[in-house]
Structures are given as structure tokens and as C-alpha cells.
Image: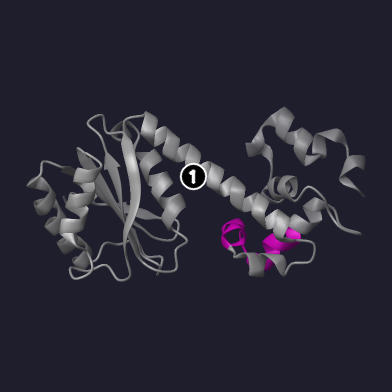
């Protein structure tokens, strides 16, 4: 039965308006982006099949265009709509960080970093540069590949911090393995950077290691 013939309180759009987005299932949320179904299937049916195919909502939205478009009825237009929605969410988080004191709500910084970095297939080292009010000036991805003392250049981090006129920094890097536990190399590199940045009066507030759906804060662990 087409969605427009469903009882009004069961239709995804009407349900969102009347009860809020949190009341919708993953399939119902996706159906709003899919907009239309195909012969014999509603947008909700297609969303359920796509979730079953990929195994989870996260794997679906992180799929590349080729893998996404393999599913019957899911073309490039639907892929683009979902990717645009993800980018809007990330930009909203970044805007919040630029407006508010990061230390007053550290979960916002962590959520932003996880949304940006958790899906990377390679290791990335990034910096959140902050001003005197602990608001974000810039987010820069600086180094790529295995994180160790040879691949992280303190001089480049110091130069970038001075360029942004930063007062403080939060480091972040991801572990593509999915395990967020900091390694010995992570700790050594962090101390190396703390020493270098202290020479130019830039404070290191935290180093967040991002895994698959989890993260570890050096500050919370007492590792800084």
C-alpha cells in the first residue's frame, strides 16, 4: 500500500511533524530522504531492505556511491541527499564549537571529531585550534598514515598554531582498527607536542583517540 494511503499518524513525514524526529525508526528517517519508492515497494520498504543489506544505519551512510547505488531503487540522487544531510550535521556541530566554550561542553567537541574521523580507512592526525575563550578557530587534518614520532612533525603543528593565533589545541586521531585505546607511540607523540607547544605558550587541552563508536580522552585518563 502506498504511504499516502497509510493512516496519517503512521506516515514518516507526518509522524516527524507531530511527534519529533526521535520518534521515527531508522527506516522511517531514511524513507524521508528516499522520498519515493519503486514499483511494489514503498520508500520505507526500500529503507528496510537497504538497512538489512548493509547491516546497520552507520554502514549504510558511510558506503561509497558505488556500493550504495547497487541497491535497486537507490540511485545517485538519494546518495547525494544523505551525504548532504551528514555534512549539514557536521557543520552544525562545528558552528556550535565556534560559538561556545569547548570546555563547558566537551561532548560537543568529541561528537564533532567522531563524526569527522571515525569512518576513515587510514589514520589521520588532526588539530582543533582554539582561541582564548576556548572556542574553535579551525579544524585542520595535518598528518596521514601511521601515527608515530617520525610522522608527526612538532614544528608543523607549532607553525599552524601560530598561524591561527591559537591559545590552545585539542589533538585527535583515529584508529581504523576500531580500537580506541591509546598506544605507547600515541603517548610519546603527545608529550613531544606538549613540550614543543609550551615554548610558544599554546596549551594542549586534550588528545582524543577515536575508534569505532568509541573514543578515549587523554585528559580524562590523566595522560597529559
In magenta stretch: residue 198: no
The residue stretch that appears in magenta: 48-62
Q: Main secondary structure of the magenta part?
A: helix
Compared with residue 41, is residue 133 higher up or lower down, i.e. above or below? above
Q: Residues within 10 Å of mark 1 (few under 14, many from 20)?
A: some
- In the shown orientation, is residue 28 left or right of residue 171? right
The residue tagged with tag 1: helix, strand or loop? helix
Which percent across, then down, holds residue 188?
15, 63
- Above or below — where is 36 with respect to 66? above
Q: Residue at x 64, y 51 (%)?
A: 82
Depicted 139 relative to depicted 55: above or below: above
Q: Nearer the viewer, residue 211 or 155?
A: 155
- Residue tagged by mark 1? 90
Q: Is residue 56 magenta?
A: yes
Can see residue 205?
no
Residue visible at 60% across and 57% down in the picture: 61
Label total for image: 1
Where residue 215 sits, quadrant-wise, is: bottom left
Q: Please state the horizontal and vertical placement of residue 41, each as a whole percent of the image.
A: 86, 57
Would you say 166 lies left or right of 35 here? left
**Above or below, comparing residue 205 to residue 190 in the picture:** above
Amino acid at each position: 500500500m502506498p504511504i499516502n494511503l497509510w493512516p496519517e499518524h503512521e506516515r514518516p513525514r507526518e509522524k516527524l511533524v507531530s511527534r519529533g524526529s526521535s520518534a521515527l525508526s531508522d527506516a522511517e528517517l531514511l524513507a524521508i530522504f528516499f522520498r519515493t519508492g519503486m514499483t511494489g515497494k514503498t520508500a520505507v520498504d526500500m529503507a528496510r531492505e537497504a538497512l538489512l543489506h548493509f547491516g546497520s544505519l552507520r554502514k549504510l551512510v558511510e558506503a561509497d556511491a558505488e556500493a550504495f547505488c547497487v541497491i535497486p531503487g537507490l540511485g545517485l540522487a538519494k546518495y547525494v541527499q544523505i551525504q548532504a544531510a551528514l555534512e549539514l550535521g557536521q557543520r552544525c556541530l562545528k558552528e556550535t564549537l565556534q560559538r561556545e566554550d569547548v570546555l563547558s561542553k566537551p561532548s560537543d567537541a568529541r561528537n564533532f571529531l567522531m563524526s569527522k574521523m571515525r569512518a576513515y580507512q587510514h589514520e589521520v592526525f588532526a588539530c582543533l585550534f582554539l582561541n582564548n575563550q576556548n572556542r574553535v578557530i579551525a579544524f585542520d587534518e595535518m598528518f596521514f598514515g601511521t601515527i608515530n614520532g617520525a610522522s608527526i612533525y612538532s614544528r608543523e603543528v607549532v607553525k599552524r598554531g601560530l598561524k591561527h593565533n591559537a591559545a590552545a589545541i585539542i589533538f585527535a586521531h583515529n584508529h581504523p582498527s576500531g580500537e580506541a585505546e591509546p598506544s605507547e607511540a600515541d603517548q610519546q607523540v603527545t608529550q613531544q607536542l606538549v613540550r614543543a607547544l609550551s615554548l610558544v605558550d599554546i596549551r594542549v587541552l586534550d588528545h582524543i583517540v577515536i575508534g569505532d563508536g568509541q573514543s578515549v580522552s587523554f585528559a580524562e585518563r590523566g595522560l597529559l
